[in-house]
Image: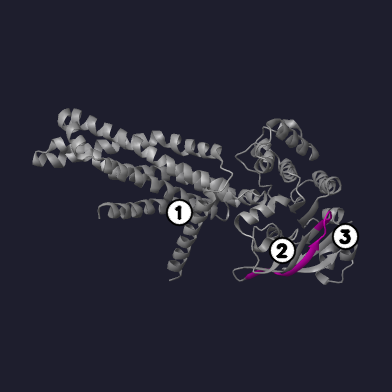
Amino acid sequence: MGRIRAGFEDFGEQVLFAGEALAWAFRPPFRFELLLHQAAAIGVGSTFIVAVTGLFAGMVLALQGNYAMRQFGAEGYVGGFVAISLVRELGPVFTALMVTGRSGSAITTELGTMRVTEQVDAMESMAVNPIHYLVVPRVLAATLMMPVLDVVFTATGYLGGYLIGVYVSGIAPGPFLDHTRSMLEVGDLEHGLSKALVFGAVVSLIATYRGFRATGGARGVGEATTRAVVWSSVAILVVDYLLTFISIG
Amino acid sequence: MIEIRDLWKSFGDKEVLRGITLDVEPGTTFVVLGASGSGKTVLLKHVIGLLRPDQGSVVVDGKEISSLRGPDLTDARQVFGMVFQGSALFDSMTVFDNVAFPVRERERRIPHDELLARVIESLRVVDLGEDVLDLWPSQLSGGMRKRVSLARALVANPKIVLYDEPTTGLDPITTNSVDAMIDQAKERRGVTSMVISHDIASAFRVADRLAVLYDGRIAAQGAPEEVRHSDDPYVQRFLSLWFEKQ
């Protein structure tokens, strides 16, 4: 019972932390240079790894799609299947998981180290609110960059799916592209990008909260980072289900 | 200027502060002496609002710090500078950016030349030259880190400076220069200082008034000579070890 209660208290504190970050986001001064710096670290820094994972995810989708659909003689639909899977589901979810592993863990480690070495206290003592200075730019940057990375993942994924579908599985390019156009709708893009936006906020809020809660030196920072990655991954899948349910439930 | 009234603080079952009451007058240096684990740092963190008391109050310049929250608390901290035990320099910033940080945050449109001049002046007060401006905290010795931390605490001309164990881990010469800096800040800039320390020699050198903290309570407080001749058995034992050596 004690652990369940502690879990609820922790969740409540996380929600209050998110509310505080939201309130500070609209308060001047607006530190655009910090926002750009974080956008570069999270966005540009993650582009390569997101593109590589996107490429292989698309290639696997094409192989699996072709394997399933050729039993019905429907190989031409593989293009549409790859595109919809990437745009609606795999793009935002895989991108968020990759950003969690790369940037979320780095954020928790950095802020956790600052917390246990009193750098966060020092900032407060200089009349600078650490949530305003450290958390807001990271959360805004992750929220804005996640849809951009999602587009990178989806585009490279579709390219990978096309290359495998057309050049390995022997699907004709015409039907591959035609069925993508006929099956994919603007609503699918909106659905995927809005998920990426929400995941960006969720992942960065968990990472910054865990960093701020770190205690007890290097070991405490390590534990905080592990928790950030685990809970971000769980949160991505839970929120993904909820958003999908709201959308098509 | 700083009024602490009946301050109580516990962490779990452990009572760390048990009814602390003291006043720090403007333009004076107040030292809180005590052994490790006596609650000194916890007391100091209450003064600047980094911790909230379970009971009691901290009033600074007429504002009750212990009841402020959010932006009001952030604004109230404008009068403070603080030197942390482990220096707490931002390790992702150079010495220049560390010292410039409080000025940049308070005067966002300050021209770079003016900012540079203020940083250099502040570093000069702590006997550091321009050659350290581009160094990273990891490239500095412990004593240099402490001095940069002091320069950062003084650069924005705070009315009150809080020192958390400013001489711990320093050699005797650097300890003397840190003591001199605390005196200089008081004499040249009229700074009010609150120092917490277990360094008895340093405490008696810089203090206008002094308190000895023991087991979460103040065992004695007053002018240094009054505290030295206190009847309290703990204070006698705590101070005698050092005075007998002299």
- The x, y position of residue A54, in whole percent, is 32, 37
Label 3, label 1: how many angstroms apart (C-alpha)?
51 Å
Q: Would residue A13 appear left or right of B213 to someone viewing this image? A: left
Q: Look at the numbered disc 3 and give the secondary structure of its residue.
A: helix
Depth-wise, is mark 3 or mark 1 nearer the camera? Answer: 1
The reply to whether callout 2 and callout 1 are in contact (CB within 8 Å) is no
Which residue is pictured at 46% across the width and 39% down the height? A42
- State the image quarter where residue A191 is shown: top left
For the N terminus of chain A, the image quarter is bottom left
Residue nearest the viewer, comparing B32 with B37: B32
Q: Which residue is mark 1?
A: A227
Q: Which residue is mark 2?
A: B58
- The x, y position of residue B32, in whole percent, is 78, 60
Q: Which residue is mark 3?
A: B243
Kindly report the secondary structure that dominates the magenta region of the rendered protein.
strand
Residue nearest the viewer, comparing A19 with B47: A19
Labels 3 and 1 positioned on one and the same chain: no
Q: Would residue A155 appear left or right of B236 to someone viewing this image? A: left
Question: Does residue A171 appear in this view?
Answer: no
Q: Would residue A141 appear left or right of B119 to someone viewing this image? A: left
Magenta segment includes B124: no
What residue span does the magenta drawing correspond to? B14-30
